[in-house]
Image (spheres, helix red, strand yellow):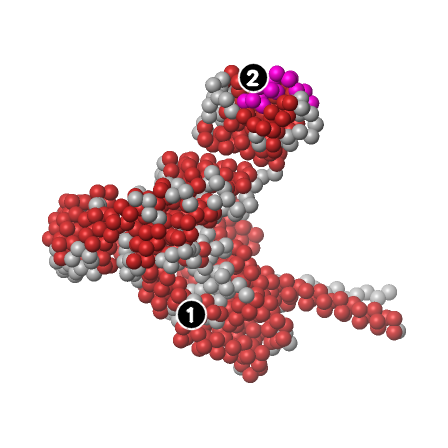
Amino acid sequence: MIFPYFDAFKSLYKSPLILLLIIINLLYFFAGVAHWEQEYKKTLAEKTLLKTQGAIYATEIIHDYRYDNTVQQKIAIKSITDHSLHSALGQIAFRDHHFLTRKNYIYNDTVALNWWKKKKNRFVQSDKSFSSRIYGYSKSQNKIVNLITYQFFHSGVVHLLGNLLILFLVGSALESRGFGSLSVVTYVISGAFAAIAYSFFSKGMSIPLVGASGSISGLVGLYIVLMWRKPVKYFYYLFWPHPRWYGTLYLPAWSLIFFWSMGDIAGVLAGVPGFAGVAYWAHIGGAISGAAIGITYLGYKAAAKELNSQKQLAFN
Amino acid sequence: MVVKDIKAPKIQKKKSLYRASSMDRAGAALFDLLIIIMPIISVLLAPIKQKIKIASLVNEYGYLGLYLFLSVGIVFVTLFLYSYVSQYFFQKTLGQFIFGIFVKEKGLVKLSKKATLIRSFIWSAQVLLLCITMLPIFINESWQFLHDKYSNTSVVTQSQYKYKNLWVQKVGLCLFAMAVGSVLLIKMANEGVPSQVAERTSQCTSAELLAKYDVGSEKRLEKLYSLYLLNRISKNCLEEEVEVSVYNNSNSDTVGLIKADFFKNVNNDISKKYSDSICGKNKNSYACKVTKLKSYGEEFNLEDQAPLYAKIVLAKKQYQSGKLESLEKTINSMPDIDIVSGFKAGYAAKVAWGKTKDKKQIFNLVKGSSSTDEQATFQMWSCNKFMQQSCSHKNSKACGAFREIAYVPEDNKELFELTKLSLDVCEQNFEQRYELRDVERLRKILIQKRRKKMKSLLGIVVNSKHSDLLKQQAASYYISFAENEEDVAPMYIYWMSGNHNLVWKNIGEEIYKKYYSFSSGEKLIGIANVLNKAFPSELSEKRIVLSALVNKKIKKQPGRNIASEGFPKSTVIDLLKKDVL
C-alpha cells in the first residue's frame, strides 16, 4: 500500500479556502442525509421484483436496436433459455433511465407486467426525492447547477471521509504554496469537466454522479503540473509490522501520474459498458482538466514574465 | 612559470559488502510486487478481466481457459521484464533501492546478461508459483534462494542490518508462509470444498439436510431451487421436497408469483396442482390468477376466472354484434379490476378492430384511457398483430403508435422501412436472431456514405447466403440511392439474369422507374419485355404504361419521371392520346 502524503497534515487554519470547500461538502452531506436511498435498497432486496423486471427488460432490449451488440443484449438473449439471469438483468435495469421512464412495454405476461409496473412506479416516484437525484449529475439531471452541486454531495460516510481526506492533503499542499484561489477554481472547473466526461462515456446511465472525486483528481492533475520535479512524500506499508516494512519515501511529483491514474485506467479498460459502479471516466476527465488548467496557468505566467522583461528592457 | 600542485588522486576505499537480510529482501520484493508491478498488471489484464466479467454475466465460460493462460503469460512477461531491465541496468529494482540493497554477481562488478536472464526468469516463475520455492527449505546455507543459486548472484548491502538471532528470521519466514498459506487455503475452502462435499453427499441427503432449515418457508424453497439450478440435486429429489411443502406455504401475492415460476420450471403437473389448491381457497385471489396463468399457460381458459372473465365474454359478444360504443363502457365499468384490465382492453380492441372502419376511434379510446396497463396490452398486441397492416396507411394514428413502439423517428423513412422489416422477421420467428442481425447489418450500412453504402448493399444482394427478404430490402435501398445509369446497371444485370420472379417483380419495377428517370430507352424496353413475359395475366395500370412504352420504343425524354406520376390510368391514357409516351 502506498499513499501520497504531500506535505502531511497541516493545520486547516493555514488553508482557509480548502477548509471552506470541506465545510461546504459537509453541509451538503448533512442536508442530504434525510433523503438517503432507503427505498432503493429496499427495492433491490425484492427478488421477485428483480426477476420480473429482468424478464421485462430482456424483452425490451431484444426488441430495441439501440442495444444491439451490447452486453445487456447478450445477457437478454441468453436469458431466453436461462431464467436465472433475470435477477442480474433486473438490477441492471435500475441503471437504465430510458427503460424505467418508458410509457409502454412489450411483454406478453400481462399479469407480471402490471404487478411490476405498480412497484416500478412507486420506485420511480420515490427516486425523484433522493438526494443523489437532486444534487447529482446524470443524463436526466443535466442542468448546469447540477454540474456544480454534484461535486459537493457524497453518497455515504466512507465516500465523504475518503474524499475529504485527500482533498485536505492535496488542497492544503497547494494552498500553502500560494495556489489557494487557483485550487478552488480548479476544483470547480475540473469537477464540471469530470461530469461531462462521465456523461459522454457512460451513455444512458441513469445513476447520478456524486462526489468530489473528479474535482480532487483535478487538483492532483494541477499539483503534478505545477510541482513536476519537486519531491512528494509518500507513505508505504507492506502489511507486516516490521520496522523496515513501513515508512516514508520521496518521489518526484510526476510519479503521481503512475500511482494516481493506473487504477482509473484499469477500471476504464476492465469496465463493462453499462455496469460500471465507479466513475473512472470522471476521475480521468477531472485529472486531465486539472492538468490543462495547470499548463495554462504556467503558460500565462511565462508570458507575463517575458512581457515584464521586455518592458524592463525597453525601459532601460 | 608556475607549476600547479599536483594533487594525489583520492584512493577510494573498497567498501565492504554484507549479505542483505531476508526481511529486507522480502520487503523489497513485496514493494516491487504490490506497489509497482500490481498496478501495471491490473492495467494490462484489464481487457481480459472485462472479457471474464462479460463471460460470467452471460454464463459462458468457453474461453475461460484461454483467458487464464493469457493472464498467466502477461503476468510472467511483466515480472520478467521488470526484473531484467531494472537489475541489468541499475543492479536493483525500485524496492531494492528503497531497502538499500542491490544484486551482485560473484567476481563481477555488474551483472552479466546471462546471469540477469537466469535470475529474472527463475524469480518470475517463483512468484507465479506463489513463492513456494522461497520457503526456508529451498534456501541453502549461504542464504541463497533458487534464483540466486542458479544465476550465481547474491543480494548485498553496504550497511549491515544485524539481527540478534538468525533463527528468528527463519521462524519469521515460516510464520509468514504459513499465514499466506492459511489465507489461500481458507479462500479455496470457501469456494471449492463445499462443491466437492456436495458431490460426495448423495443428492437427496443434501436436500434433506438443507430442508431442516427454514422448514416450510420460502427461503428453503429458494435454496432448494438454487441447488437444483446448480445441478447439486436432481429434479426427482426436488420434486419430493416440493410436494411435501407445497400446500403448507403462505398464500401471499409475492409468494404466489415465486412459487408459480418456481414450480413451472420443476414440474408443471405439481405447478397445476398447486394452482388448483390455491384457487380452491379463493378463485378471485391474485395468487390464484398468477398461478393459473403461470402454470397453465396456453391451456389457461379465461372463462374459468369466473366473474371477471364472464364480463369479458359479455364484452366479446357485444363487440361481435358490432357495437363499438360498448368498448368504452366496458373499460370504464370495470376500473377496479387491475389484473385483467389489460386483457380486456386488448381483447375488446382486437375484436372491435375487425368490426369497424374507424380504427382511429379505437386507438384514441384505448390511448386515452387512464390505465397504462390497457395501453401496454393494446400496443403489445397491436405490435404483433395488426400494426404492420395499419402501416399500409402511413399517416394513420395506429401507424404512429407502431413507430413509437419501434423508436423510429417519423421523418426517417429508411429506418421506418427497416423497422417494418424487423417486425416482419419478429413475427416470422421471434427467436431467430440471425434474421434480426440482418436488420442490424442493413441499419449499419444505411449510415455509411453513399458510394460505400451502395457497394455494401450490392454485396448483400448478390450473396446467396442471405434471405430473400433481406436481399429485396437491400436491392430496394440500392435502387433508391442510385444517381445515374451506371449506378443502376449492376442491379439491372442481376435482375435481368433471372431474378425476375413474382417476389422480385417490385424490384424490377423500381429499376424500371429509376431508369425512366434517367431516360434510358433501351433498358426500359428490356425490362418491360421481361415484365410482360413474366406476368402476362396481370392487367395493371403499370402494364399499360409498360406496353405503351414497348410499342412506342421511347428513347430519351429528359425531365420525365414516371415514378412521381404514380401511374394513374387516366393520366396514362391522356399521355397516350397526346402521343407523349
Farthest residue in the left direction?
B244
Mark 1, other Cα within 10 Å: few <14 / some 14–19 / many ≥20: few
Dominant secondary structure (helix, strand or loop) of the stretch shown in magenta = helix
Mark 1 secondary-structure assignment: loop
Mark 2 secondary-structure assignment: helix
Q: In the figure, A211 relative to B90: above or below?
A: below
The location of residue A11, given as percent across then percent down, is: 53, 82
Which kind of residue does numbered mark 1 sit on?
A: Ser
Of A247 and B577, nearer the camera is B577
Q: Is residue B548 magenta?
A: yes
Residue in view at x 50 percent, y 64 percent? A141
The location of residue B243, given as percent across then percent down, is: 12, 50
The location of residue A265, given as percent across then percent down, is: 51, 56
Residue in view at x 61 percent, y 76 percent? A180
Q: Which residues are magenta?
A: B543-556
The answer to which quarter of the image holds residue B65 is top left
- Numbered marks: total: 2
Residue in view at x 50 percent, y 42 percent? B394
Which kind of residue does numbered mark 2 sit on?
A: Asn
Which of labels 2 and 1 is toward the front? 2
In this picture, residue B362 sits left or right of residue B228 = right
Of B568 and A173, nearer the camera is B568
Mark 2, other Cα within 10 Å: few <14 / some 14–19 / many ≥20: some
Q: Which mark is residue A129?
A: 1
Reading the image, the residue beneath label 2 is B529
Q: Quadrant of the image for the N terminus of chain A?
A: bottom left
In this picture, residue B92 sits left or right of residue A294 = left
The numbered mark 1 sits on a residue in which chain?
A
